[in-house]
Amino acid sequence: MHPAIEDVTVEGILHALSDPVRVAIYADIVGSVGSLNCSNFLKVSEKTIPKSTLSQHFKALREAGLIRGERRGVEMHNTSRCAEIVKAHNIQLEQNARIATAGRRKAGKVGKRAGK
């Protein structure tokens, strides 16, 4: 149901957030103190969203790894995975930067401008 944090990709996140309704849903979830259930989003930006459409939006956000859904009785409560994503991608960025720097050191290009 939820991808492992290391399987969350930038491409998947961008695709999930390519829809303005999903952006609004995700922004509300990120800005909330606790979890929000799907019924909180029957109206998004003053527009009524059918439950079936809402379900598809939440599925896209979950599959992209942006939210975590937890069933409580008959309701699905959603929380943001923002902190997990930032931590995972910062680690990935740091590792990529180290690899790139090591490669540049081997090539003798660290600290030098291109063309000089």
Image: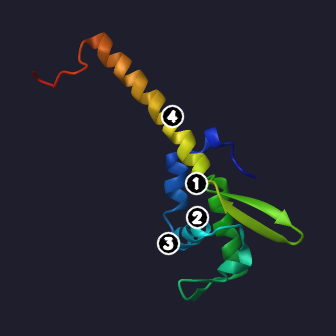
**Viewer-side residue, 10 vs 88:** 88
N-terminal label among 1 and 4: 1
Task: Give the Cα separation between the discs numbered 1 and 4.
Answer: 15 Å
Task: Give the Cα separation between the discs numbered 1 and 3.
Answer: 18 Å
Q: Residue at x 50, y 49 (%)?
A: 11
Up-down relation of residue 63 to residue 55 (above or below): above
Up-down relation of residue 84 to residue 92 (above or below): below
Determine the image quadrant of residue 37: bottom right
Q: Amino acid at mark 4?
A: Gln
Determine which of the numbered discs, if any, sits on residue 82 in the image.
Answer: 1
Residue 14's x, y, as percent? 49, 55
Q: Amino acid at mark 1?
A: Cys
Determine the image quadrant of residue 75: bottom right
Q: Which residue is under mark 3?
A: 20
Q: Amino acid at mark 3?
A: Pro
Q: Secondary structure at mark 2?
A: helix
Up-down relation of residue 98 to residue 19 (above or below): above
Residue 55's x, y, as percent? 71, 71
Task: Give the Cα separation between the discs numbered 3 and 2.
Answer: 15 Å
Q: Residue at x 56, y 42 (%)?
A: 87
Q: Residue furthest right?
A: 73
Residues at discs 1 and 4 in contact (Cβ within 8 Å): no
Q: Which residue is under mark 4?
A: 92
Q: Secondary structure at mark 1?
A: helix
Eye-nearest disc, 3 or 2: 2
Residues at discs 4 and 3 in contact (Cβ within 8 Å): no
Residues at discs 2 and 1 in contact (Cβ within 8 Å): yes
Q: Amino acid at mark 2?
A: Val
N-terminal label among 1 and 3: 3
N-terminal label among 3 and 2: 3
